[in-house]
């Protein structure tokens, strides 16, 4: 269900530009199932919702790791 002209998926090229990385990094990440995607034949489709959720989760886990490595701050229970 497409709402107007809003795209529901990114192409690998669009995702590459959003992440500011090389073509080989994108395709390697897709092949290794790091970036959520759907493969139709030889074509990769990257659902926008899943892409942004994955990116948010990666940023959050990086922040948690940074906070845990900071000796002046510890998360509760750590």
Image (tube, rainbow, N blue to C red):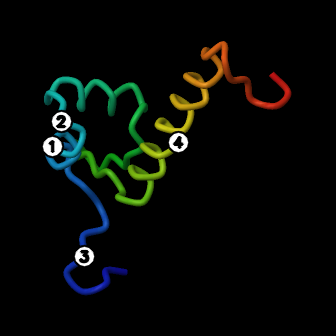
Which of these two is toward me, 61 or 24?
A: 61
In-image side of 35 versus 78 (left or right): left
For the residue carrying disc 2, how many other residues have a C-alpha within 10 Å: few (<14), some (14-19), or many (20+)? few
Give the mark, 4 or 3, whose residue is nearer the N terminus. 3
Q: Which residue is mark 2?
A: 20
Q: Which mark is residue 17?
A: 1
Compared with 11, 65 (above or below) is above
Compared with 50, 27 (above or below) is above
Closer to viewer: mark 1 or mark 3:
1
Closer to viewer: mark 4 or mark 3:
4
Report the residue at 52% width, 42% height from top: 57
- Does the residue at mark 3 contact the one at mark 2 (Cβ under 8 Å)? no
Give the mark, 4 or 2, whose residue is nearer the N terminus. 2
Report the residue at 73% width, 23% height from top: 74
Q: Which residue is mark 3?
A: 6
Question: Residue 14, image x and y in percent?
Answer: 17, 49
Q: Which mark is residue 57?
A: 4
Report the residue at 39% width, 25% height from top: 32
**3D distance between C-alphas at marks 4 and 2:** 18 Å
Report the residue at 82% width, 31% height from top: 76
- Does the residue at mark 4 contact the one at mark 2 (Cβ under 8 Å)? no
Give the mark, 3 or 2, whose residue is nearer the N terminus. 3
Element marked by disc 4 = helix
Question: Residue 24, image x and y in percent?
Answer: 17, 24
Which of these two is toward me, 64 or 12?
A: 64
């Amino acid at each position: 269900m497409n709402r107007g002209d809003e795209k529901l998926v990114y192409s690998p090229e669009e995702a590459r530009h959003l992440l500011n990385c090389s073509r080989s990094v994108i395709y390697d990440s897709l092949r290794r199932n790091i970036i959520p995607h759907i493969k139709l034949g030889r074509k990769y489709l990257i659902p926008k919702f899943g892409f942004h959720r994955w990116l948010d989760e990666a940023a959050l886990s990086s922040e948690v790791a940074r906070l845990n490595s900071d000796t002046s701050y510890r998360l509760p229970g750590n």
